[in-house]
Amino acid sequence: MNPLVMNKLIPFLLSIIFLSCQTEQKKQITQVISFKGQQVTGVTATNTGRLFANFPRWRNNVENSVVEISDSGVATPYPSKDWNNWNLGAPIHDSLFVAVQSVVAFENHLYVLDTRNPLFKGVIGQPRIYDFDLNTNQLLNTYFLSQGSYHHDSYINDLRVDKKLNKIYCTDSGHAGLVIIDMESGNSIRVLDNHESTLAQVNKLTFDNGDWKNTVHSDGIALDTVNDELYFHALTGYKLYKISTQSLNSGNVNIIKNNVQFVAQTPAPDGMIIDSNGTLYLADLEKNKIMQYNINQGELSVLAQGENIKWADTFTLHDNRLYYTNSRINEAQDDISQLEFSINYIEL
């Protein structure tokens, strides 16, 4: 190539690369709150902007399972301190949080998913979902998972509420599968148990600080309420799947299996969420990125990346902001007392 052309072309190409990098970095990230030595995994925002978070029972020193975060950045036990005062080895009852993995605000309800599997040592009693009325902050209902819809090694991970069909859908990351809860009867069934779409693909993820060795099955879940499709993804895996809610609720094992669709090859994520425009948000855990997948056009792109993203665990949307938790799971070893875990948001 002519040297004069090259002299003009190189700066042009460099400018394109620079602008591309700037596009990935342009989203402003703001920290809402941080917790020293307390590993936050879940976050959810209500329609009015109330913000809740949860802390799983993965260690002995969990101060609270569920908190509400004020506008001034103060975390208060929710719905009370009594609900959050269980310690490992203590007696349990039905008005205690034991091992909360997810909180999801939907309309005027807060759904608190209690795995009842502290320290991953096996389910104590029944996994359940507590349904709180956000007007009164009182318990409205408890959905106990039916026998047969979970296993002893189940770790019921996340949930989505289907208002049209009056169902709750859950992933099980401990024993691959999905759980469907009928909100009217309270009964639950298990589907896609150990199915290819719910099983982990690999037994480790690779980070700059080394391999994180673990096998985590069906984890992230997102409901497309426009097209009535449920998306789900194993944590240690790179395949995104979906199924229509009609097929999922057919009651026919073969119909359910035959209607699971592979959607796309993606980075390994944790939680997921879909906005009303058809954008699915998910993490690239291994690369400290938050991705966005256009479900209508099939396009995957980077929304944000960098040191402010450290295992983006769970997402929630409010007021054109994408909130997420930095749960730093790959960094959190035996002693986490000096680690900071945060909730941040991105202006969309």
Image (cartoon, rainbow, N blue to C red):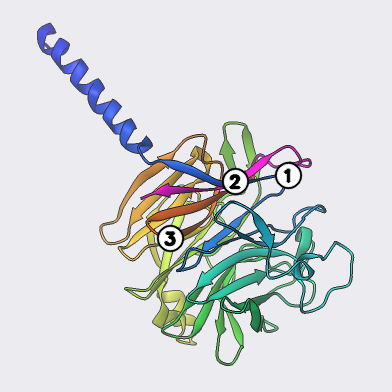
Judge left or right: residue 7 versus residue 95: left
**Which residue has dot 1 on it?**
37
- Say which label, 2 or 3, has the lower sequence index: 3
Label 2 Cα crowd, 10 Å radius (few <14 / some 14-19 / many 20+): many
Tell me the amino acid under the disc marked 3. Answer: His
Label 1 Cα crowd, 10 Å radius (few <14 / some 14-19 / many 20+): some
The spot of residue 173 in percent (x, y) is: 62, 62
Judge left or right: residue 196 versus residue 213: left
Magenta stretch holds residue 343: yes
**Which residue has dot 2 on it?**
342
Range of residues picked out in magenta: 330-348
Tell me the amino acid under the disc marked 2. Answer: Ser
Judge left or right: residue 88 versus residue 97: right
Residue 198, by quadrant, is bottom right
Tell me the amino acid under the disc marked 1. Answer: Gly
The spot of residue 305 in percent (x, y) is: 44, 38
Residue drawn where x is 37% and y is 63% of the image: 275
| 258, 105: nearer the viewer | 105
**Which residue has dot 3 on it?**
318
Whether tag 2 and tag 3 are in contact, CB under 8 A, the answer is no
The spot of residue 190 in percent (x, y) is: 59, 79
Can residue 159 be seen from the camera position used here?
no
Judge left or right: residue 61 versus residue 237: right
